[in-house]
Amino acid sequence: MNNNSDFNQTQFASQEPVMEDAVSYQEPVTEDIQVAQSTKNRRKLIVFGVIGFVLILVFILLLILIRALSPVDTVTTDENGDLIQVQQGELDPLLEEVYLLSRDLDNADPSLNVIPFPPVDMELRLEEAQRR
Amino acid sequence: MKKIVSLLLALSLFIVPVVVIAAEQPISQKASIADEIAEVYRTYKGQLAEYRQANDQFVIAKGQFQQLNTLSSLEVAVQDFRKVLSLRDQVLLTYLKLIELELIEADGINLEEKDIALAETLDLQRDFLAHKDLVDNAIDRVAVNRVADNFELLSPRIVNLSNYASTLLKIGKMQTILDQSLTLVEATDPRNLTDEPSLKLNEKIRAHNEITNLINQIDTELNSVWDEIKIAREKNKLSENSKVNASIYAGLSQVLVFLEEILLDQ
């Protein structure tokens, strides 16, 4: 209920209950607090920056390590005689050479033509049209 | 400080792609000639597609001229005919370039034959270029028909060269494999093994002799093929002896199987 509608004249206006919510008191922001806040933010930024940089560096190092440690693939055959890839170091170099030669031999199949003749009409003529 | 952090992050972002790209680089670089072959082959494919399109157009124009028999339909047919003749020459010129590069890149080809094939390839390139110029400059029906007739002189030469080069490339590949196999057989000679028990050593020597005999047999066959190629080329009657080629191919395959067996047994 609105207490302003109370017509009791024995009551002083100053004694009337406060109708609206009390305004909370805020302390004025001092310069020190602003400086402290700014330093805190900067520190946060530095920490995140350094963590990011370190993570990226670790990623690069891992990449280099993986590259350096992974052996180069080479060619060999499986039980069916089909060419497959295996890791280097598992094979005798001479045996590896044999497998590479087998692959070359597949490409040297005499039934394959490296340079087939172009599919063009070698007997193009306009004469047929002329004769009619 | 902000600047330093930003700089570090930017630097990291720059380093990552550089490292990744560097890690992906192949160890060995492709030979420039192989790149050139791939490039010419792409061009050849494009020109062939263009030729097919022009040929279809010419067939339609020719059909219309046959039906209508008017001066305007004749003009269209002549112009389309000229275009398709020019594109055919272009395709064949690029094909000749492809043959030239394949021959240069190939190993194992008898040098005398290789030189002759290359010389003929360059000769034909010149002649086709001259023919293409004639086609491009032929403006009327009579001139276009004349250059079309001239093509009959070039046609058998390029077909012959194609067969010749194709045979040289096939035999050259097999010759290369034989030469490399011979090196491997020498490297696996069991007589070089000192710590082998004599019983096992004798078995290995017999196996080695078997491979050597097979290689000698293939070598003889290949030599006779080179001689045949020379004779056929001189007579201008080059035809592939596919039976001999298949026999050499089978022999080489056997050599490699034997070699694998010996090396796995070691």
Image (cartoon, coloured by chain):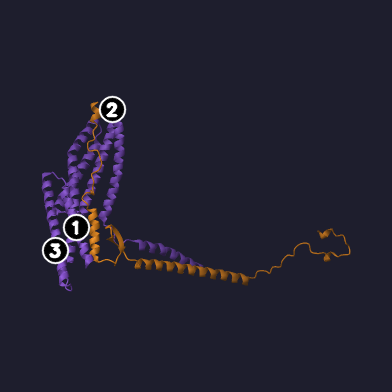
Amino acid carrying label 3: it is Asn
**Tag 2 secondary structure:** helix
Can you say whether B240 is above or below A68 in the image?
above
- The part of the image, by quadrant, that contains residue B238 is top left
Judge by depth and name the residue closer to the eye, B247 or B119: B247
Q: Nearer the viewer, residue B21 or B255?
A: B255
To the question of a shared chain for discs 3 and 2, the answer is yes
Q: Quadrant of residue B56?
A: top left
Parent chain of label 3:
B
Image location of residue B35, percent across then percent down:
28, 54
Query: Which kind of residue does numbered mark 1 sit on?
Result: Gln
Residue located beneath label 2 in the image: B66
Kind of residue at badge 2: Gln
Residue B47 visible? The answer is: yes
Chain for colour purple: B
Please, what secondary structure does the residue beneath circle 1 have?
Answer: helix
**Residue at 20% of width from left, 56% of height from top?**
B253
Q: Residue A99, image x and y in percent?
A: 25, 60
Q: Chain of mark 2?
A: B
Residue A125 position within the rendered picture, expressed as x and y whole percent measured from the top left: 23, 33
Name the disc covering residue B209, or none.
3
For disc 2, the neighbor class at 10 Å (few under 14, some 14 to 19, many from 20) is some
Dot 1: few (<14), some (14–19), or many (≥20) neighbours within 10 Å?
Answer: some
Q: Using the numbered discs, state the Cα–Cα distance from disc 3 to disc 1 in whole angstroms.
A: 14 Å
Q: Is residue B114 left or right of residue B88?
A: left
Proximity of marks 2 and 1: CB atoms separated by less than 8 Å = no
Residue at 31% x, 41% y is B50
Residue B70 shows up from this direction:
no
In the picture shown, does residue B96 fall above or below B58? Answer: below
Chain represented in orange: A
**Tag shown at residue B254:** 1
Instruction: Tell whether A83 sits left or right of B124.
Output: right
